[in-house]
Amino acid sequence: MRELFFTLTIYFLVSACGSSDEPVETTAVDSALKTALSTTQTETTTAPTETTVVPTETTTAPTETTVVPTETTTAPTETTVVPTETTVVPTTSSISQEQENNWPEEWEAVLQNQIDSLVVNYSGQAPVSYDRDDWGSGWGDEDGDCVNTRHEVLILESLEPVTLNASGCSVASGYWYGAFAGTYTSLPSSLDIDHFVPLANAHHSGGWAWSAEKKNAFYNDLSDPQHLIAVSASQNRSKGARGPDEWKPADTSYWCQYAFSWINVKSRWRLSVTSAELEALISMIESCDNPPNVSGSPSLPPTTTSPPTTTSPPTTTSPPTTTTSTAPSNPGDTVNCGDFSTWVEAKAWFDTYYPYYGDVGRLDQDGDLNPCESLPGAP
């Protein structure tokens, strides 16, 4: 800057003199001025490079702040596990599909496996008393079509199409084979629906610990054709709540199927057997000349050309009123369940008069043709 100042001063002095005799000097000054200006301009326009350097580390974004922990999104699974043992109800046979496929060749081995699966309860008694009311109020209507379990069984087991009453809710006629006695009938009122394993037996075999819902499901189980069966009222009354060690069907040809169905029901519902019961079952199985029917339907003898001679069923909901010389006198509403000491006695009275006068004693509150079901010995 000092050089520029002195150069300008000299330049102005020379210019002021304006002498034409000093052209070379003036030229020299101009040259000096140009050189000074050029040098000064170069100095002032050259920017220090250090001030233009931008540190690069400030433009780098830290990456650790963008990482989101993933463990918080994992939901624990143990809280979604729901125990099912109290709500599971068997819906299929205890015979597996593979066993059923091999049934014609391996039925003896399959039967032995079923027997081996049974748990023996040597006491045969439950820690609490049996109360039939714990098992529900009677036949249910699961599909809501007004046809209860009793009449569903009659429809399923009839050997010919059934006819229903005017309401369409109960069976008026059909044709059935009573397996326990080996007889035919076309009179639905002469049939009882038997729990293959009676409720009292199921109670003492482990059912006492079931929930009310599971007991009711056992009472009305239609998923297995072996569970409920239409039999003659007399055979059902004779059987009562007794197991195979105390009672067997009158038709000995049915013993093989009877034992198989009993074992299957007990196995499906995980019910125990007594040692005497197991011994009787094995003895009955030994009578099997051919494989029992896995579906539970009895092997029927050849059907006759005409149904047996029986009293025709009523075509209306009212019981028949025609009497013959063999018909008992109408007793009217003269008894109640408290007049009988056992269910067998009540059932005998009911069966005597019902075919002629209906339920005149009003002993059958749920219409299943089993009167006084709260009495000892009821199935």
Image: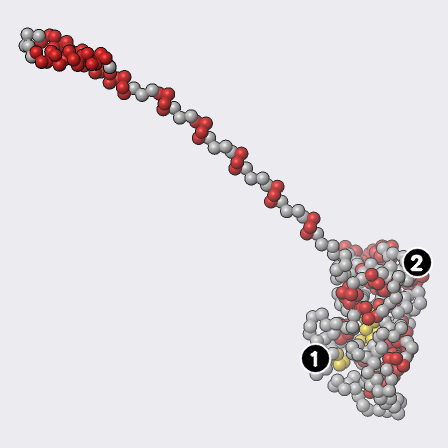
The kind of residue tagged 1 is Gly
Q: Does residue 277 appear anywhere in the picture?
A: yes
Measured in 3D between alpha carbons, the distance from the residue under mark 2 to the one under mark 1, in whole angstroms, is 47 Å
Q: Is residue 140 left or right of residue 205?
A: left
Mark 1 falls on what kind of element? loop
Residue named by callout 1: 168
Q: Are marks 2 and 1 in contact (CB under 8 Å)?
A: no
371 relative to 289, above or below: below
Residue for point 7% across, 12% down = 18
Mark 2 falls on what kind of element? loop
Residue extending farthest to the left is: 20
Marks 2 and 1: which is nearer the front? 2
Q: Is residue 291 left or right of residue 19?
A: right
Residue named by callout 2: 122
Residue for point 66% across, 47% down = 76
Quadrant for the N terminus, please. top left
354 relative to 221, above or below: below
- Colour scheme used in the picture? secondary structure
The kind of residue tagged 2 is Tyr
Residue for point 84% across, 87% down = 333
- Neighbours of disc 2 within 10 Å: few (<14), some (14-19), many (20+): few
